[in-house]
Image (cartoon, rainbow, N blue to C red):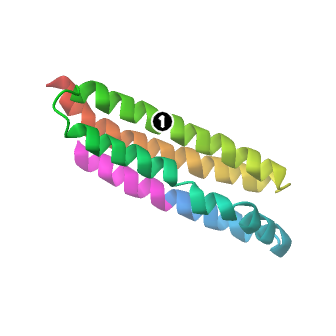
Amino acid sequence: MQTSGFIALLGAIFISRLLNEKAYKSLSDEEKLRLMDGFSSNRTYSMIPLIVLIGAYFLLMKVEAVDKGILSLTYFLLLAVFIITRIVFNQRKLTSLNLPDSYKSKFKLSQIISLVGVAWFFYTIFSPLALS
């Protein structure tokens, strides 16, 4: 079952990238410039909360007094909140940049495909643990 999760994750990333590239190519030069400028600071700082979350998770996994099940559940709930927040932020940013609706819908679809791939990946990893 974990193999299907890994395949789903890779497939989702690949399909998501293809959709993003196709959508990007449909933009005019001016729209591409607005897109790159609009997300420049986003690319720099968006990974900081994720790195902190992952670091805290691995540090707390080494603490004996912490319930590993509750820690893992909290981690994945916070990860889901982070992903949903990023999706909402990205959609608002694309709207503020006045990009075409066709680009925004393809971008949203690529994010949903990525999210489904990641969700299936984690489900296949943790569902055997929940059943045992």
**Quadrant in which the C terminus is drawn:** top left
Give residue 106's position: percent from left, percent from top: 67, 53
Residue beneath the point at 33% across and 54% down:
7
As drawn, 29 above or below 93: below
13 in magenta: yes
In this view, the residue in front, 12 or 36, is 36
As drawn, 104 above or below 33: above
In this view, the residue in front, 31 or 27, is 31
- Can residue 74 be seen at all in this image of the molecule? yes
Residue marked by disc 1: 80
Question: Among all residues in the image, which is located at the extreme bottom?
Answer: 29
60 in magenta: no
Mainly helix, strand or loop, the magenta region? Answer: helix
Residue beneath the point at 25% across and 31% down:
127
As drawn, 113 above or below 127: below
**Res 57 quadrant in image:** top left
In this view, the residue in front, 81 or 49, is 49
Residue beneath the point at 34% across and 28% down:
73
Give residue 79's position: percent from left, percent from top: 45, 39
Residue beneath the point at 72% across and 68% down:
36
Q: Amino acid at mark 1?
A: Ala
Element on which disc 1 rests: helix
**Res 71 quadrant in image:** top left
In this view, the residue in front, 118 or 11, is 118
**Quadrant in which the N terminus is drawn:** top left
Q: Which residues are magenta?
A: 1-14
Left or right placement of residue 128 versus residue 123 in this view = left
As drawn, 60 above or below 24: above
Q: Residues within 10 Å of mark 1 (few under 14, many from 20)?
A: some
Left or right placement of residue 27 versus residue 108 in this view = right
